Amino acid sequence: MTIILSISAQKEKRWAAGPYGLFALEEGTLLPTPQPMERLTVCSAIHDRQLVGGAPHGIAYLYTGGVEWQAAWLGGATEAALSLAPHPDVFRTAVILAGTEGDGVLRSTDRGHRWTPCNYGLRNYTILSLAWAPLDTAARWPGREFVFAGTEEGIYRSPSGGRGWKRSDCPDAPYQSIAISLRFHRDGLVLAGTEEQGLYRSADRGLTFTLVEDAPSRINSLAALDGGWVLSDEEKLWRSADGLSWQAVAGSEPALVLTPTPEGILAGTEDGVQLLDTETLAVVESFRLALETA
Amino acid sequence: MANTSQYRARVAGPVETHEHLTMGINLIADLLAPTLGPIAGHIASQRDTRGPELLDDSATAVRRILDFGDPRVDIGAMLMRSLVWHTAERVGDGGATCAILARAIYINALRMIAGGINFRDLERGVLAAMEAVSTDLTTGAHPVVSEDELSEVAFTVVRDRALAGMLGEMSHLLGSNAKVTVQKYVAPYLEREYHAGANFGAEIASYLLYTDAARKQAVQTECAVALVAANLAEAEDVIPLMEAAVAQGAKSLVIVANNFKDTALHILINNHTAEKKKLNILAAKIKPVGEERRYAMEDMALLTGATILGQGFTPSPRRATVEHLGRAPRVEVDNGQFRLLPERQRLVNAQPEVDMIRQRLAGMAQNDEGRPLLMNRLASLSGGMGTLKVGAIGKLEREVLSENAERALKVLSTAQLTGVVPGGGAAFVHARAALKAVKFDDDAAYGVKLIHDILDAPLRQILVNAHVSAPGVIIDRVMEAGPESAYDVLQDKVDNAMACGVLDVAGVVDTVLRTAVSTALMALSTDTIVYHKNPKQAMEP
């Protein structure tokens, strides 16, 4: 059993993380990789370094080609990072956000070296999910960068790239997953999933969320695709064109995390990682722990 | 009148009075008229040794004029200067519109009075019409909610897309009573920060207490908080506080006091820098004085649960116990700011105080001198504040950026409270419909007609500034297009105001109309002017 809770895909480098460790995804295998956390919760790779979140170090990073992980300077924060979200154009901006288990949102402007708390407007400091909206190249107002945070009690929206937050109009619930339409600046669609209280949808750029009646009630993971959405409950995958009506994908396996990539969707499961075809959601390739494969 | 200076004082009668007032009122209105609208001109203000200063906002332009050197002109001009300045101070914008309206009311009313209309009846009609228009403006306003709508409003003030976008975002996140500090930088720069928690002016007692000396920043978490309204100098002043913090089981001790000196400071530093220390220590000297300091201490006490220690009737720090200390999850001292993140429950407990401050602010003008203190307290007790960082290479450009940003923040605050109406003077034109219901059988009807006639003056001036060849035709088209329409000068078309972003703030437009009416009526009711030989110049209008 190799539970995977976080997947990061950066060009040809793909990583997966979960309670059993950090793994590189290579030719159908999960290759265990040394990392410094006793409790690993999340991983993320950007162009020149790899980051992991967890306890006891909060966030640590390793330069590409480096051998020694370094603990990041967290500006007084001590809790584990539960989510890491690089800016859509992290190469240019060097901005990464981290959601922590009690210290709120941390923001780094130097690719994860130093972090500062950016909690203005948050009422709950346990951040379960973070998601950036795609950048709007034709934005009427320069500097407008939308990012959403799911906390234990609500969804928070930041039009300021994570510098300040405002609670969306949504029911009190722990929002474990958030997905943002690839055409966010035209359709304004955002979906937020809970593990107990169903799926919520916003069509006004995340200002208000309403319950989607025709959707599973237990959402493990969510992802936005080009022209639709995919989610996983405890039993199988579901897909939708508009986020309102959902169809179960016959023969599919449940996923704990869904990460769209140009090659397909990487799905983290309780037993490794699967690469799914974006159109059919059929399994194209399975990645399992090297020992199990052998 | 040319030889006024020969007399100690000189009296001008009714005819002369209105001739002179008209000269001054026209002078300022003509000066400001070209600055109205998006295609507006600048005012070049000559300075002693430097090049002329280019101004595009009415309040700054009139502030640069202390007198015209001709007493006949000065009396009306200074009246208008005061009108423009106070309008901008009160609501942040609308000075030029106010001057145009006041001039139109005054000149039209003079003609009516000369034609035999009774002034008191005229005044009654004008006031009734003003109330009808005001009601129409405020009830027909659209609420502004999103950051984009607020940015549209900010753009009408600052005319800089990047700055307007940021101001709209800050206003959206911080709310209608936003506490924003504008910092100026000496190079082109535009950035914003949001600070969670309560912010107070305070300095660290010693640089040895910084946790990040390079950034001059001290951060402590899981803090016991001691508040002392006195100077701490002796060992006996601080040791009981440290013992109480250890007994409380805190990781750090934060002491806020008037000042730290001598042995007390040495003990704190030695304990903080010791290798095997039991407590991290942060000592901060509170900066505000007087009433502001008292409120800051009380607010910190409310947010941490600490008792204010000190002298006199309050317990002495020498007798401090665990019960006297408060708690805070995180405290930061950075760049002269003391930032305290309170426990969630403490913010809930502070809610009645927050509600009371909000009520007081709601009934307070934007330029009320008590407003900044209340806004500081509201920001501290309700969640935080923002910092806008603007920079430019030239000093003048920097000043203009900073002043524009501060004016826009006032306008945005009013916009959140009162909503927006079609801009560019269109709301005034649409409000003419409300005057149909205001009927009089006597001369007061001329007052209603007067207001009806002058309501298109701002839009007409904007069209003239944009070199539109037939302003009357455009005004008719705007009226025909319905109450949601405005004329988009840049696109040269009549369009839905919300869709094309041509907006005015309802509260600003209302204040502008009321101020213009009040000033014009005051000028009309003036029958005599006393000219003094050497009148004093007023720096502040």
Image (cartoon, rainbow, N blue to C red):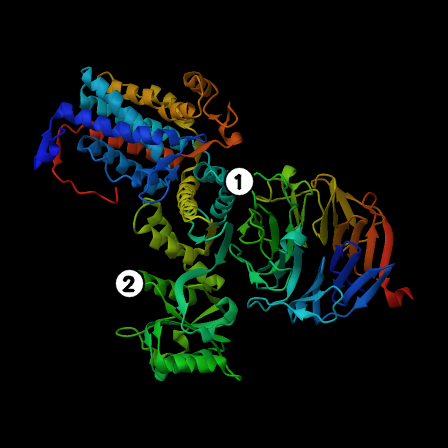
Up the image or down, A104 lies above or below B309; here it is above
Q: Nearer the viewer, residue B435 or A98?
A: A98
Residue B148's tag is 1
User: Residue B239 location, x and y as percent?
Assistant: 40, 82
- State the image quarter where residue B19 is shown: top left
Chain under disc 1: B
A142 relative position to A131: left or right? left
Q: Are marks 2 and 1 in contact (CB under 8 Å)?
A: no
Q: Is residue B379 visible?
A: yes
Instruction: Name the amino acid, label 1.
Output: Asp
Q: Is residue B423 left or right of residue B1?
A: right
Which amino acid lies under the numbered mark 2 shown in the image of this protein? Gly
Residue found at the far right of this picture: A294
Pick the residue in front: B21 or A290.
B21
Q: Which element type, helix, strand or loop, lies under badge 2?
A: helix
Determine which residue is flagged by label 2.
B290
Disc on res. B134: none
Quarter of the image for the C terminus of chain B: give it.
top left
Residue at figure coordinates x 30%, y 63% from the top left: B289
Numbered disc 1: secondary structure: helix
Residue drawn at x 38%, y 38% as measured from the top left? B55
Q: Quadrant of residue B451?
A: top left
Give residue A208's position: percent from left, percent from top: 57, 43
Residue B194 in picture, x, y percent from top left: 49, 55
Chain letter belonging to callout 2: B
Q: Is residue A185 left or right of residue B269?
A: right
